Image (tube, grey):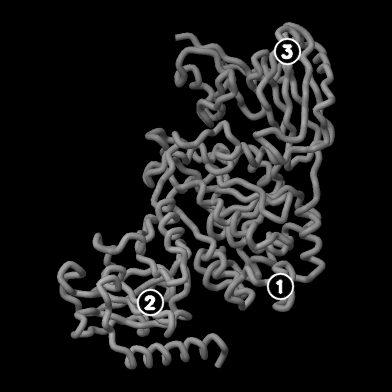
């Protein structure tokens, strides 16, 4: 008999003993939160009370299903009737019930006569968690109840597009769930690059921009390899609706290059794709160990270049857990790992996750109750995967080296200045990107170089810019002496005399007349604001109001005037 089986048996026997040894005697407060907490005996007694003002109806069978029993009927959570208190009840130990759901607390619902019962209106405030499932929760006497209620308020809120400032890199990262994994410089996590999961049908009006900024930020950071924790959806492209407008799922240009170069890993060790249940409740299984092995081997393969992107569909559960494991193996501290895990909540699409759920995975891997007490998390987790034959120390070291290497590139800024030669100031930070490259100092303010063959155009090339940080700069007009706002880029870009993003004068123009119905274009205003994405190029003039636009197809741009 193994340890888990023995522990389960002892827990059941202890629970049966407790049930027989104690009278029920629930208080009104107990009834209104639907459970009794006994810290001294370390038990939770679930209550389905039939007094006036509480639950109603005939009960033939009664169970509690929750995060602690995989939402299935179990003999240990079958309710019995107590005539004295007029309550159906069952008592379980802390060890049994303390398995968190998305809220970070044990979650449950009563199942009466085979049907789930929704949380009642009379339930004490704070004891139902306001995600889409609206499960009831167990709150222990030692828990921070005010924080739990605050989390529930966040969980129940869908953040509308109007609440995002998409000129702010912080909100660009929030809406796309895109960010660097702690402990690394070359691993970035995100929402899925092209599959929609939250549109109008889910009450979410941000989906179009979510996919747009995954594309933009991945392109900005030079992503060239991808780790996909969900199915291969290259051939399942379909439409989705945002704000009443229908869009076609489109594989971004950067991701198509990754596919073409065969730099995508579809994680499916032992012909099984990672799932929610496995990453949280079965991390000690061979499946999970082999998934980690498959990911690490892909990362350290000399034929697989950095930087890497990793994602599932939402970038929440599978992505959250595997990123936490990789971060820990790369030396990230537990507080940084949990903060990164909870940053996914900034999307606010009613898919809240509390770090205690992640901690449950690590509790099982490391056989500890409180992960924060582990003195050397990297060493402890490395020992687990090495001892169980999934990884070697050499593989872990090589992954650390590759994910923390720096990639440098040149970035060229072009500017149109009809009044003369502009100057360019640059530096390593600024409000929009405080971690940008520190290579350049404010003291260097050179005149830009004339762009040969293009009157009024000038350029400057920044050499050896850290790809993960980009460059920040300011342009100054020679005529008026006016300065641009703080500008930031990860790639080549062009600015007009008003410092707005504009078309590159050295690219080949494209003709509307020569376009066909299969050509897709992105449409920008003259100040660089994206107006429409991936529309049929041949119908641009029919789909837009009169004005001047920048039309981009692939890497080619041109200005287009549309008369009405």
In the rendered image, residue 297, in percent from the top left (x then y), is placed at 74, 62
Q: Nearer the viewer, mark 2 or mark 1?
A: 2
Q: Residue at x 47, y 71 (%)?
A: 142
Q: Quadrant of the C terminus?
A: top left
Residue contact at pointers 2 and 3, CB within 8 angstroms: no
Mark 2 / mark 3, whichever is N-terminal? 2
**Looking at the image, residue 208 lies above or below residue 359:** above
In the rendered image, residue 49, in percent from the top left (x then y), is placed at 23, 75
Q: Which residue is mark 1?
A: 380
In the rendered image, residue 132, in percent from the top left (x then y), is placed at 37, 55
- Classify residue 213 by image quadrant: top right
- Classify residue 494 by image quadrant: top right
Q: Which residue is mark 2?
A: 37
Q: CA distance from mark 3 to mark 1?
A: 57 Å
**Which of the two residues, 48 or 211, is positioned nearer the viewer here?**
48
Q: Quick check: can you spot residue 77?
A: yes
């Amino acid at each position: 008999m193994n340890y888990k089986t023995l522990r389960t048996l002892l827990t059941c026997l202890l629970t049966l003993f407790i049930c027989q040894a104690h009278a029920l005697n629930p208080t009104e407060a107990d009834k209104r939160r639907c459970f009794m907490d006994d810290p001294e005996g370390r038990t939770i007694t679930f209550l389905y009370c039939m007094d006036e003002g509480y639950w109603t109806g005939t009960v033939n069978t009664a169970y509690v299903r929750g995060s602690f029993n995989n939402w299935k009927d179990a003999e240990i959570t079958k309710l019995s009737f107590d005539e004295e208190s007029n309550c159906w009840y069952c008592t379980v130990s802390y060890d049994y019930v303390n398995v968190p759901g998305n809220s970070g607390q044990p979650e449950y619902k009563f199942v009466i006569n085979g049907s789930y019962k929704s949380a009642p209106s009379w339930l004490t405030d704070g004891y139902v968690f306001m995600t889409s499932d609206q499960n009831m929760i167990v709150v222990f006497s030692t828990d921070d109840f005010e924080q739990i209620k605050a989390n529930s308020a966040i969980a129940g809120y869908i953040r509308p597009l109007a609440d995002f400032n998409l000129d702010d890199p912080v909100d660009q990262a929030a809406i796309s769930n895109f960010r660097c994994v702690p402990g690394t410089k070359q691993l970035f996590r995100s929402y899925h690059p092209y599959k929609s999961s939250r549109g109008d049908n889910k009450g979410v009006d941000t989906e179009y921009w979510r996919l747009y900024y995954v594309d933009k930020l991945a392109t900005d950071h030079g992503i060239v390899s991808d780790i996909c924790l969900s199915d291969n959806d290259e051939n399942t492209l379909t439409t989705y609706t945002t704000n009443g407008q229908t869009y076609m799922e489109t594989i971004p240009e950067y991701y198509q290059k990754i596919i073409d170069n065969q730099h995508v890993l579809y994680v499916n060790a032992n012909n099984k794709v990672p799932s929610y249940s496995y990453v949280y409740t079965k991390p000690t299984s061979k499946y999970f160990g082999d998934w980690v092995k498959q990911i690490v081997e892909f990362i350290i393969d000399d034929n697989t270049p950095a930087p890497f992107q990793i994602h599932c569909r939402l970038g929440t559960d599978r992505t959250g857990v595997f990123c936490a494991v990789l971060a820990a193996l790369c030396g990230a501290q537990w507080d940084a790992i949990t903060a990164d895990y909870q940053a996914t909540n900034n999307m606010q699409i009613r898919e809240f996750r509390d770090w205690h759920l992640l901690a449950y995975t690590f509790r099982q891997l490391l056989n500890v109750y409180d992960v924060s007490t582990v003195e050397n998390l990297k060493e402890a987790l490395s020992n687990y995967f090495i001892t169980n034959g999934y990884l070697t120390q050499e593989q872990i070291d090589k992954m650390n080296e590759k994910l923390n290497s720096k990639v440098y590139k040149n970035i060229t800024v072009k500017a149109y200045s009809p009044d003369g030669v502009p100057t360019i100031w640059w530096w390593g930070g600024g409000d929009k990107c405080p971690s940008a490259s520190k290579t350049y100092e404010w003291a260097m303010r050179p005149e830009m170089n004339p762009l040969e063959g293009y009157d009024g155009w000038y350029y400057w090339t920044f050499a050896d810019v850290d790809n993960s940080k980009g460059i920040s700069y300011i342009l100054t007009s020679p005529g008026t002496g006016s300065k641009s706002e703080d500008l930031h880029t990860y790639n080549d870009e062009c600015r007009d005399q008003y410092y707005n993003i504009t078309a590159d004068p050295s690219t080949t123009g494209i003709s509307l007349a020569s376009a066909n119905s299969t050509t897709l274009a992105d449409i920008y205003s003259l100040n660089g604001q994206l107006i429409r994405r991936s529309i049929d190029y041949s119908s641009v003039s029919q789909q837009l109001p009169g004005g001047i636009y920048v039309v981009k197809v692939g890497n080619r741009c041109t200005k287009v005037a549309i008369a009405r």
